[in-house]
C-alpha cells in the first residue's frame, strides 16, 4: 500500500462532496427553492450591483458539518 493512498481517497471523497453541494446549490437556485438563502443573510442591491453575504447560511453549514464530523470521529 502506498503512503499516499489515504490522502488520495480523502481528496476524491472531498471532491465528490463539493461537487454534490455545488449541484444541490445549482438545482435549488434553478427551482427557486432558496436553500442557501436563509433569513439573516445580508443582501445589498443597488442599480447594477448585488452583494450577498451568507453569514447565517455559513453558520448553519458549519454546525451541520461539525455534527457530522464529530459523529464520524467517534469510531
Image: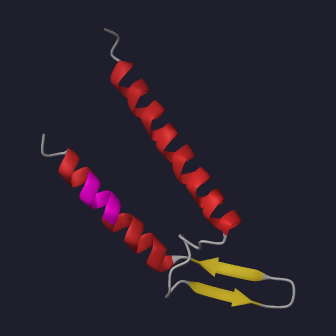
Write down the quadrant of residue 28 in the picture. bottom right
Does residue 8 lie above or below 14 as drawn?
Answer: above
Residue lying furthest left = 74
Does residue 14 lie above or below 28 as drawn?
Answer: above
Write down the quadrant of residue 68 in the picture. bottom left
What type of secondary structure mainly makes up the magenta span?
helix
Check residue 39 for magenta coloring. Answer: no
Q: Measured from the top left, where is residue 35 in percent x and y? A: 53, 70
Q: Residue at x 64, y 79 (%)?
A: 52
Q: Measured from the top left, where is residue 51 in percent x and y? A: 69, 81
Quadrant where the C terminus sits is top left
Q: Residue at x 86, y 90 (%)?
A: 47
Q: How is the protein colored in the picture?
A: secondary structure
Residue lying furthest top = 1
Apparent side of residue 21 relative to residue 30 in the rendered image (left or right)? left
Q: Which of 39/5 is in front? A: 39
Check residue 67 for magenta coloring. Answer: yes
Q: Which of 70/23 is in front? A: 23
Apparent side of residue 32 relative to residue 64 in the rendered image (left or right)? right
Is residue 4 at all visible to an observer of this figure? no
Quadrant where the N terminus sits is top left
Residue lying furthest right = 48
Is residue 2 at all visible to an observer of this figure? yes
Q: Residue at x 75, y 81 (%)?
A: 50
Apparent side of residue 9 relative to residue 43 in the rendered image (left or right)? left
| Count of numbered circles on the image | 0
Q: Residue at x 58, y 86 (%)?
A: 42
Q: Measured from the top left, where is residue 38 in percent x and y? A: 51, 80
Q: Which residues are magenta?
A: 64-68
Amino acid at each position: 500500500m502506498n503512503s499516499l493512498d489515504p490522502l488520495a481517497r480523502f481528496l476524491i471523497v472531498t471532491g465528490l462532496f463539493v461537487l454534490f453541494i455545488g449541484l444541490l446549490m445549482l438545482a435549488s437556485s434553478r427551482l427557486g427553492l432558496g436553500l442557501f438563502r436563509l433569513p439573516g443573510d445580508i443582501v445589498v442591491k443597488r442599480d447594477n450591483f448585488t452583494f450577498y453575504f451568507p453569514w447565517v447560511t455559513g453558520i448553519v453549514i458549519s454546525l451541520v458539518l461539525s455534527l457530522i464530523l464529530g459523529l464520524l470521529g467517534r469510531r
